[in-house]
Image (cartoon, helix red, strand yellow):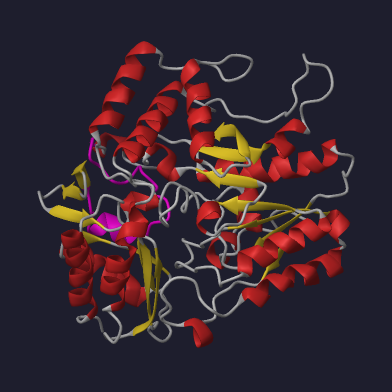
Amino acid sequence: MSDRSASAPNDLRAFWMPFTANRQFKKAPRMFVAARDMHYTTSDGRQVLDGTAGLWCCNAGHCRPKITEAIQKQAAELDYAPAFQMGHPKAFELASRLTEIAPEPFEHVFFTNSGSESVETALKIAIAWHRARGEGARTRLIGRERGYHGVNFGGISVGGIVANRKHFGALLTGVDHLRHTHLPEKNAFTRGQPEHGAELADDLERLCALHDPSTIAAVIVEPMAGSTGVLLPPKGYLQRLREICDRHGILLIFDEVITGFGRLGSPFAAQHYDVMPDLITTAKGLTNGVIPMGAVLTTARIHDAFMTGPEHMIELFHGYTYSGNPIAAAAGLATLETYRDEALLTRAAELEPYWLDALFSLRGLPHVIDIRGQGLIGAVELEPIAGEPTRRAFSAFLKAYEKGILIRTTGDTIAMSPPLIISKAQIDELIGTLGDVLKTLD
């Protein structure tokens, strides 16, 4: 039995931390207590340069005044309104603003509270859409190896990161996976999209032949796979995937939880790569990471198929208590205004040459076996220590924190996605410090 009398406000025992080595952390905690623009402040008063935009989400940096003020005002005016059979103006306003920056075919928005919920929502909409059109046999879902689509059962079922799947049983039935697109033997040290690998999209034809395409509802992929280590789509890959989906009547879902809101230099990766899916999932940058919120963007073709039958009947039996939450909607509106006022949704394209020059300057340092990057995102892949996968990258993470930069690791890959407000001098600081760290690794 735990000793409750020994608990204290800063006792670390009660909080079971997500995606964290809890025992290691609680022996030597790394605590942030404040943030502003590009920096975090630690509990011991040090400044840490944010090289990851929090968790790929604080695209406009931290504690931006317009967002903070909008949250404060909304909390005092309307804290909560039910989303079922009722509404409030800011949710409708935010949905309209989103469709203004989204690719042209996207006219409707379904609000969620996270990227995981956005994925679940998109998968359910896809299956229900086929049923609404009389193709109820289309229930199969196709993901991709090394894909990340959140941590709910649907997301880890279509996802392809082994550690996220192996502990949780058989997961959803009727799910299959495309091959991943990582070809280090052909594409190592490529700036931008790799030249090789478009033919990997043809793996979808194999799955169609195996399962019969009339049973497949949707294919879901990240246009750029972030959490698995920044895997950029080979040139022509997404286009071929779109063509195969069209040929067989399969919906294509882009998971843009990471790539949405300017990460690659366009508002959405669908625009950046000029490939239009049928549904787009978002979250993270939607509210600059300040308040949990996600959204699924749909075309009129998807939405209108549900708008049949008696008008008093619910068209889609799905939703969340906090869908379109007033405070989150206010944060989303202020975030979009900040992006607009500072031209942040295209800034990554302007900084990309400088960013990639800096990133690829790390080539040749000890243990570096690949570097990948586009827009304001980059990865440095390290040679694993024999028999101890992830240890070398985690050591880099700890040393980087001590030297005043925040990086993220996935496996033995270091991933970086700094806020879009980063300056060239701060890029030099981030990459220069990382270079110093890499030179010290065993």
- Residue at 77% of width from left, 26% of height from top? 307
Q: Would residue 395 be visible to someone looking at this image?
A: no
Q: Quadrant of residue 70?
A: top left
300 or 252, which lies in front?
Answer: 300
Tell me where residue 163 appears, x and y as whole percent.
53, 65
Q: Quadrant of residue 48?
A: bottom left
Q: Is residue 186 visible?
A: yes
Question: Which of the pair 54/165 is nearer the observer?
Answer: 54
| Position of 83 relative to 181 (above/below) | above
Residue drawn where x is 44% and y is 52% of the image:
266
Q: Is residue 327 above or below residue 363?
A: above
Residue pictured at 40% horizontal, 29% vertical: 333
Of 47 and 263, which appears nearest the observer? Answer: 263
Q: Position of residue 401 (x, y in %)?
A: 21, 62
| Magenta stretch, main secondary structure class | loop
Q: As displayed, is residue 356 above or below residue 105?
A: below
Give the quadrant of residue 437.
bottom left
Q: Is residue 14 magenta?
A: yes
Q: Is residue 103 left or right of residue 422?
A: right
Residue placed farthest to the left in the image? Answer: 45
- Magenta segment: does it hold 219? no
Quarter of the picture holding the C terminus: bottom left
Residue 296 x, y percent position in the rendering: 59, 39
Question: Which span is picked out in magenta?
Answer: 8-31
Seen in the image, is 437 located left or right of residue 231?
A: left
Q: How many marks?
A: 0
Residue 284: % across, % down: 43, 44
**Dividing the image into 4 quarters, which one contains the N terminus?**
top left
Give the side of residue 86 with respect to residue 409, left or right.
right
